[in-house]
Image (spheres, rainbow, N blue to C red):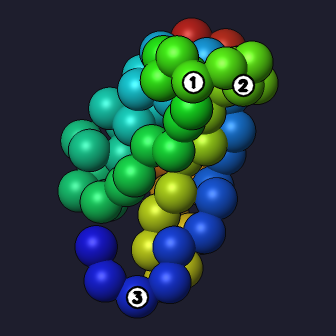
Amino acid sequence: MSGDTVVVATFRTRLEAEIAAGLLQQAGIPYVIQSAEGIGTGPLPPGASLLVARERLEEARMVLESLDEPGG
């Protein structure tokens, strides 16, 4: 992924982020999951952020909106 990356969504767990990332993958949108979960270096907050290239942000938001829709 080249260029600036921005957070498109945050999740309570890395697993939730991975599920959402699957939707981005299906749409052909490159992503990065950023999480300290599972590192084991001390008391770190759980959760994960899903990052995409700035130029794909709006497209990624539209894809992820399906997670909030009934039956999505």
CB under 8 Å between callouts 3 and 1?
no
Residue 19 in view (yes/no):
yes
- Gap in angstroms between the C-alphas marked 3 and 2: 28 Å
Residue at the spot x=31%, y=83% of the render?
2
- Front-most of 26 and 12? 12
Which one is in front in this view, the residue at disc 1 or the one at disc 2? 1
- Front-most of 66 and 47? 47
User: Where is residue 35 drawn, in percent x and y?
Assistant: 54, 35
Amino acid type at image mark 2: Leu
- Front-most of 60 and 14? 14
Amino acid type at image mark 3: Gly
User: Where is residue 24 drawn, in percent x and y?
Assistant: 36, 46
Q: In the visual, does 37 lie left or right of 30?
A: right
Residue at the spot x=67%, y=20% of the render?
42
- Residue on which disc 2 sits: 44
Residue 72 in view (yes/no):
no
- In the structure shown, which secondary structural element does the residue marked by tag 2 occupy? loop
- Note whether 8 is above or below 5 in the view shown: above
- In the structure shown, which secondary structural element does the residue marked by tag 1 occupy? loop
User: Along the polypeptide, which appears first: circle 3 or circle 2?
Assistant: 3
- Note whether 31 is above or below 68 in the view shown: below
- Gap in angstroms between the C-alphas marked 1 and 2: 8 Å
- Note whether 53 is above or below 64 in the view shown: below
- Residue on which disc 3 sits: 3
- Gap in angstroms between the C-alphas marked 3 and 1: 30 Å
User: Where is residue 5 drawn, in percent x and y?
Assistant: 51, 73
- Residue on which disc 1 sits: 41
CB under 8 Å between callouts 1 and 2?
yes
